Image: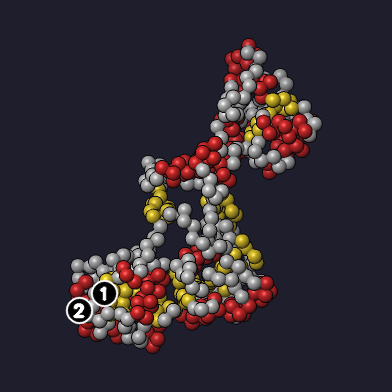
Amino acid sequence: MKKRALLSVSDKSNLVPFAEGLDKLGYELISTGGTLKTLKEAGLPAKGVSEITNFDEILDGRVKTLHPYIHAGLLARRDEESHVKQLEERDITPIDVVVVNLYPFKETIAKEGVTEEDAIENIDIGGPTMLRSASKNFRDVTVVVDPSDYDAVLDNLGNNGGTVEFRKQLAAKVFRHTANYDAMIANYFVDITGEEDPETFTQTFEKVQSLRYGENPHQQAAFYKEGNVKGASIANAKQLHGKELSYNNIQDANAALEVVLEFPEQPAAVAVKHMNPCGVGIGDSISGAFEKAYAGDPVSIFGGIVALNREVDEATANQLKEIFLEIVIAPSFSERALEILTVKKNIRLLETPMQVNENDTKKVVSVIGGLLVQDRDNGKVLAEDIEVATDRKPDAKEIDELLFAWKVVKHVKSNAIVVAKGDQTLGVGAGQMNRVGAAGIAFEQAGEKAEGAVMASDAFFPMPDTVENAAKAGIKAIIQPGGSKRDQDSINECNKHGIAMVFTKMRHFKH
């Protein structure tokens, strides 16, 4: 039987040279729609699928390749005598090569203002069906979904028709591709139907890069991103300078980005070390904000990650260059800032928008054999939301300081305590087994600056001991969720020392 190749692609990059290669290898070319037009315009002897099936395209092209003459040609096993006999009886020619990529569903739903009708019309039916048929029969059929594989395919086909092992690898790639495609469609329908907890949870990601290793050198790792990620994200950040990001770099960079996004209204700077903020500052300028963040903990920032929510200008770049930093993240860098910072060979400079991705509503954590899925902690507390629990009420300045500290403590590992004054953090106690321990670390770091400062706790006080220590440190106001059966003990302790305390009625556990 003669060799036959079916080509039907939305991405026509390098299509003609590839088809010319197939023609030279003796393959009869069959095709559909725009692909057929492209091949004929290039002078290639391609036939339309309708000539093969003797059945015209119908339903505005929705049905054209869904036909036994196509799928029998794809699925017939060449080593099965009954299959070969049935093809001969019906005058069906086997299809040896399938080249298909799918309707641009991902690109369609990424468009602003896309309608449901447009999205649904870009759900490919015939393409995935042909790909799956060809991939199932990989022992006899070469299936191609990625134009980057064209040269390798021609080389393999030119070697006595190719190898089964190579065809198996291509088939595996196809099944990943169609799974990714179907997952995007499934998630689109989850969104438009408002399903909160579907019976199956489907996510799909595309590879950004292989990493040298994971958290430790003996762990293999790679970095993937969501298909249509928008807004602030390390996954779609543009790296302007520096060596490749590591696994830990990406973790820390994401932690810094999450904190700085809490302050969209003002220039803000965040320094992160081991996924915990070690210094946060806001100010009238990005240079001033960074100065405050640095002063919050000039020791821990060494070798850390800095995120800024305004363009890095010359003044800020001069501040940054004086410190050893792994990464600087910002929405942009001025030309002069780049000149200053790129002198440092190893610093990574990342550029990403600072708009929150409104579609990123779920957080996923892996456990052995499963996933935990929850809403992201997007909880906000405003001045009007807080409840004053003590005799002394905080004044307006103290309320601003408390709310600032509350935004930061949300991103600190539990048990978490943040000490702040004005528009900067002074001490951060993170990830301790008890709240008194976390507070002790924060007070020690703040030192004498804790006098007259405010304190935030990510969860309530089960005992008054944290308040006792806060009073000794000179804390003047506390913000915490409240809700303990023994809240009154802490309230009484605050009243005893003239400390104002407010409840948010919202906790921020971060395990």
**Relative vertical location of residue 459 with respect to residue 477 in this rendering, above or below:** above
Mark 1, residues whose alpha carbon is within 10 Å: few (<14), some, or many (≥20)? Answer: some
Of circles 2 and 1, the one toward us is 1
Q: Which residue is mark 1?
A: 388
Could you say where residue 217 lies in the image, as x and y percent from the top left? 54, 61
> Is residue 274 among the parts visible in the rendering?
no
Q: Nearer the viewer, residue 225 or 41?
A: 41
**Relative vertical location of residue 135 with respect to residue 252 in this rendering, above or below:** above
- Residue drawn where x is 21% and y is 71% of the image: 487
Alpha carbons under labels 2 and 1: distance apart: 13 Å
Which quadrant holds residue 454? bottom left
**Relative vertical location of residue 357 with respect to residue 6 in this rendering, above or below:** below
Q: Which mark is residue 492?
A: 2
User: How many numbered badges does the structure rendering display?
Assistant: 2
Could you say where residue 146 lies in the image, as x and y percent from the top left? 65, 41
Secondary element type, mark 1: strand
Secondary element type, mark 2: helix
Give the quarter of the figure containing the C terminus.
bottom left
